[in-house]
Amino acid sequence: MPVRVQQQDFDVGAELAALRAGDARVGAVAAFVGTVRDVSEGSVVAAMTLEHYPGMTEKALEEICNEAQERWQLYQTLVVHRVGKLRPLDQIVLVIVTSAHRADAFAACAYIMDFLKTRAPFWKKEFTGRGERWVEARDSDDEAASRW
């Protein structure tokens, strides 16, 4: 189960193809791509910087993927998360899950994203016309994770 934290962009199509290549068992592929929005809390976002705690971040993502593997019948999972300076429209995160059936793939993909948002040590600073600000954790993310 690959987990990567990197500065460079990723190719969604290439990542999807590589994850399911040659595996005829795969009947479902669920993917999520998160991107940088141009507005946050009413302010225009010019850019953002994502920071992480190397080693600890990858370990947290691997644990989340392992938990998903234990809950659902999955073949592969992939998480690619970018760090560094990003601008609106840039891709931030990619989660891909393969399974025999769509229900497992959809549920596991949502689970991984919900817990990535609440348990993986990432810090986000936004640069807006109103200045710089660190983004606080959102109650809605905690609520989403609590449903599991």
Image (spheres, grey):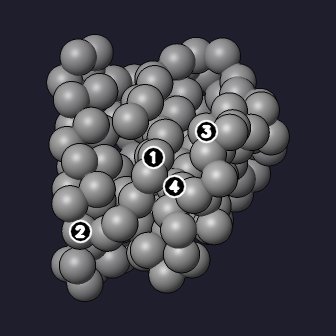
Q: Amino acid at mark 3?
A: Leu
Pick whichever of labels 1 and 2 is earlier in the sequence: 2
User: Residue 14, how many percent across, how many down?
Assistant: 77, 32
Q: Amino acid at mark 2?
A: Arg
Residue name at image x 54 percent, y 28 percent: 82
Residue 77, numbered label: 1
Spatial CA distance of label 4 from label 3 is: 9 Å
Q: Amino acid at mark 4?
A: Val
Query: Do residues under tags 4 and 3 come within 8 Å of each other at their CB atoms?
Result: no
Q: Is residue 106 visible?
A: no
Q: Is residue 73 visible?
A: yes
Quadrant showing the C terminus: bottom left
Pick whichever of labels 4 and 3 is earlier in the sequence: 3
Residue 19, numbered label: 3
Spatial CA distance of label 3 from label 1 is: 8 Å
Query: Do residues under tags 4 and 2 come within 8 Å of each other at their CB atoms?
Result: no
Mark 1 neighbour density, 10 Å: few (under 14) some (14–19) many (20 or more)? many
User: Residue 105, how many percent across, how many down?
Assistant: 50, 68
Quadrant showing the N terminus: top left
Q: Element under label 2?
A: helix
Q: Is residue 112 left or right of residue 132?
A: left
Pick whichever of labels 3 and 1 is earlier in the sequence: 3
